[in-house]
Image (cartoon, rainbow, N blue to C red):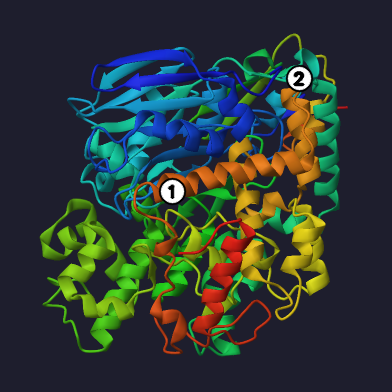
Amino acid sequence: MIHNAARCTGCRTCQLVCSLSHDGECNPSLSRVVILAEGLRIRAEFTPQCDECARCARYCPYGAMVREE
Amino acid sequence: MEGGYSGRLMLVDLSRGKASIESYPAEVALDYLGGFGANNRLFPECSRPGTDPLSPQNPVVFGAGPLVGTTVPGSSRIMANARFPLTGAVASASGSMGMGANLKWCGLDHLVLLGGLAQPSYVYIEDDRAEFVPAPSLWGRGILETTRSLWASHPGSSVLAIGPAGESAAYSSLAMIDACATLGRGGLAAVLGSKNLKAIVVKGSGGVKIADPARLQELVKGLYERLERFDMREAAAALGMIGAWPMYANQLMPHGSTAEDLQELSERFGPEAYLGLKKCRISCPSCFLADKDELYLPRTGENVYSTSFLNAAIIGCALGMSDAEEAASTLAFLDDLGLDFMTLSWQAAFLLELHERGMVTEADVEGIPLVRGAGILRELAARVAERRGEVGRAFARGWQGALDLFGEDTRRFTMLVRGQDCLYDPRVSGLGTMEFEQLTSPRGPTSASAGSATYVPGLPEERLRRLTARMGAGEKALDRIFSLPRSMNVGRLTRYSEDWFSLFSSLGICNRYQINRFYSADLIRDLYAAVTGLKLETEEMMEKASAGWELYRELNAGEGLGSEMDIPPEAWFSEQPLWGRGGRLKDYFGNELYREDILTLLDDYYDERGRKHG
């Protein structure tokens, strides 16, 4: 998975979708996407538990999450 | 309740420097849905009618509804109830960015502030813990600097901050969340400032439990599919609200403008001008159509945030600013001071009206430049924020201060209801629900609380009816609204617009047209059931939303601010241009309206609410 910070608006949908689908609740701290925020600038990383299901990419409204084929 | 609600609130006693986690009665959420409705239910529990808005006894109740902090698109709303100094009303203000979601991720549905601090401080809330941090070095700082400083101290947090205008208790002050979302038109920042509270920093490390995750995913997937089919998606994604520039431009044009003027205005403030400043778009949590920005201002080399570039275009058009950069820079200046750009802009326009009529000279206003442009707004804002000079002190007390200074006779050059300026002039846009509701809103005119399909000009009656049905109005109500002698009764429709707002604000969804257009009452009912596990009929859910609004009205009637205050401003009945706007009062379809029509519509509005007017 790749996060394109230039396209990211900081909506955190990636984290919420990830935790909802894997853990059944909307909880950023359970997400396989880790957001490192500097003010409103966002950088995202992926935990080793990420199985590249790409739901985060499917729901990212801004095309900031991409699964590299 | 299986999800959505935590059933907990944090009670913060600022005077004692103590905070505690409390349970609140389940009926508060069950009867009023949460957020807005629940705030209205909780507020009188901790407040007495008649309390001075600027005394420590004026509590502030924040609430985030059960959908906040979830994947539901646009579910980031935070509501704040307090007595506001501009009108004296118990206002329920609506804001966005990260505060609501972080509050929910702390495991809290509400935050209640009582009393006042002995010295300037901020409160840091992390999950169940609150820390009171003295912050004398932040006092006097602008909102952007304060927010950046607190982000640096508390990475990953959301920051609500006030600026110098709130510190000096200016009535037209407001707070900003994460430096790009406003909260509390009419003086919320003054209320916080009077408590010596510079900021609230919130960081949650938990989450929101979901009753039926699979169903929620399915419903959200459907919303994303609708987004894919939205023909304006590309323009909205790239440009935000300014993507619908032609619709707004017609309303922002000064009275009597020509097609050439429109072209010229579009070049100064339209999409191309915006793209020249745009650095990146910023979203509230879960929003799929971002409308906040980081902008780059080439002349000063500054990066600033904007609540929406449309707001820069509004003040640029209203005061004849030279270009987009001047407007964006001026908007950022007011945001940084923590002042309501609309009230200040109309106050500048008021001074220009008096000057053009020979009633006021620059010497009378202590050298404020009485010419159109950014200068008058910047100078007035700086003086209000500092309460500097006679004019600064007077205008810091809101419109009443201005009328006290220049004489009650100058009220004819204003457009006020309940002491607050009208945002919408029905002589320009026609009397839709947002224009009409300026009369009935308990807190005075606001930008948000009566959105409906009338936001979009020129829709045929059949489409208006269909879009009103989407808002949960039943068939009998639709028959009453869409009947002769008017093909659409805006008084009756406004009741359902307010209930629609109450529903969104109670559950925590953004009520901006660009977001709410994707929702229907039935879909919201299903989302509510998926998140909370509570299954309601649509009608039952709308009744709860309506009950939340009725509480809001009763709260203010208890303060002596009932329906007798629903007085249309005289300027509506004059064709004379005021603040650059003018023309005859007309309905949504362009038919002329008279004073008696407005009074009849007010009666119809209250009839639809099951009450008597007056």
Are discs 2 and 1 located on one and the same chain? yes
Which structural element holds mark 2? loop
Q: Residue at x 77, y 29 (%)?
A: B529
Examine the rendered structure and indicate whether residue B192 appears above or below residue B370.
Answer: above
Q: Residues within 10 Å of mark 2 (few under 14, many from 20)?
A: many
**Quadrant location, the C terminus of chain B:** bottom left
Q: Residue at x 65, y 73 (%)?
A: B246
Using the image, tell me which numbered label, if any, was put on residue B211.
Answer: 2
Q: Residue at x 31, y 66 (%)?
A: B377
Relative to B162, B167 lies left or right: left
**Quadrant location, the N terminus of chain B:** top right
> Taking the image as drawn, is residue B322 in sight?
no
The residue identified by callout 1 is B304
Relative to B223, B10 lies left or right: left
- Using the image as rendered, state which of residue B334 and residue B537 is in the foreground: B537
Q: Residue at x 53, y 40 (%)?
A: B96
Q: Position of residue B104 (x, y in %)?
A: 56, 23
Q: Chain of mark 2?
A: B
Which structural element holds mark 1? strand
- Using the image as rendered, state which of residue B183 and residue B500 is in the foreground: B500
The type of residue carrying mark 1 is Val
